[in-house]
Image: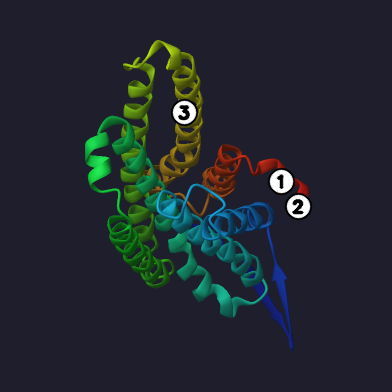
Amino acid sequence: MNNSAVNLSTNGDSTAVSIGLVNRLEICVYLINLLFCLPTHSYVMRLIVTGTGNGIVSEFFILNLSACEIGVCLNSLIFVLSMWFRSLSTFEQFLIGFSITGRPLFQCLICVERYLAVVHPVTFLKYKPLRYRVICCTAAWIICFSSCFLCMFTLDSQYAVYICFLTMQLLVFLFIKLFCLSAVLRALKQSGPGERGREREEDHMKRRAFYLILITTVTTVLTFGPITVTGFFFIVTHNYVDRPEVWLSGLLCFVLAGFVQPVLYLRRTGKFSRFCCQI
């Protein structure tokens, strides 16, 4: 999930590390991700675990997403350190699975949950108990760690396989999220039955939910769109080595989008201003 080519030149007992412009920009992107995402996701996890939010059952997918994002933040830290300590590169490649599989997978689970809650409420109530969420998250973590091992063994030796795997799975995740979000948007635009005295309150709640889903939809396109197009660019042209800046443009959108979900959650629960005061 990165362009980690670093030129090493050995002169006697000293080893000099030459970092190009693209690598410097990558370091800045990952440091920003680390500084912003780590405290926000840690705060979200604390709110959910301590019961300050809406309950661990209803926010179980968000809890797992934040835990996965902690792994993404760790990947950002190890990536920066691996520029100077090459022995960490294998561990850094392992952590890439949290970014390319874990994050979009748990985001898809959240989108599917919202889709069922709005479009198919009867099915949602049937599978609302915690045990079904635990089963889904267990399967998601198994897939995530499988992706981690795949990245660790293919990123250096079979880079073309890694790019195809990255592009195809992100494309699938993008379609699933857009389908669920667009269906929720259509459902929220329709006026539902209700008493006249509660009509204004229901319209206000629908409007808030509509704007929240709309922001999530736009964020999804900006997060997965550029990196997916970049993957197809490499598959078609095999020109990654000569055009690393093209890859960086997609990486920038994908990495920095990690803070959107916790910010939306904190604003929805009314904890955003308190979190800003604490930092």
> Horizontal placement of 21 versus 245: left or right?
right
Q: Residue at x 40, y 11 (%)?
A: 196
Residue 88, horizontal then vertical, whole percent: 57, 76
Q: Nearer the viewer, residue 110 or 77?
A: 110
> Does residue 147 appear anywhere in the picture?
yes
| Residue that label 1 marks | 274
Q: Nearer the viewer, residue 196 or 142?
A: 196
| Residue that label 3 marks | 209
Q: How is the model colour-coded? A: rainbow
C-alpha span from label 2 to label 1:
6 Å
Q: Nearer the viewer, residue 103 or 91?
A: 103
Q: Residue at x 56, y 60 (%)?
A: 50
Check if mark 3's residue and mark 2's residue have beta carbons within 8 Å. Answer: no
Q: Look at the picture and state if 270 lies above or below 41.
A: above
Q: Residues within 10 Å of mark 3 (few under 14, many from 20)?
A: some
Disc marking residue 278:
2
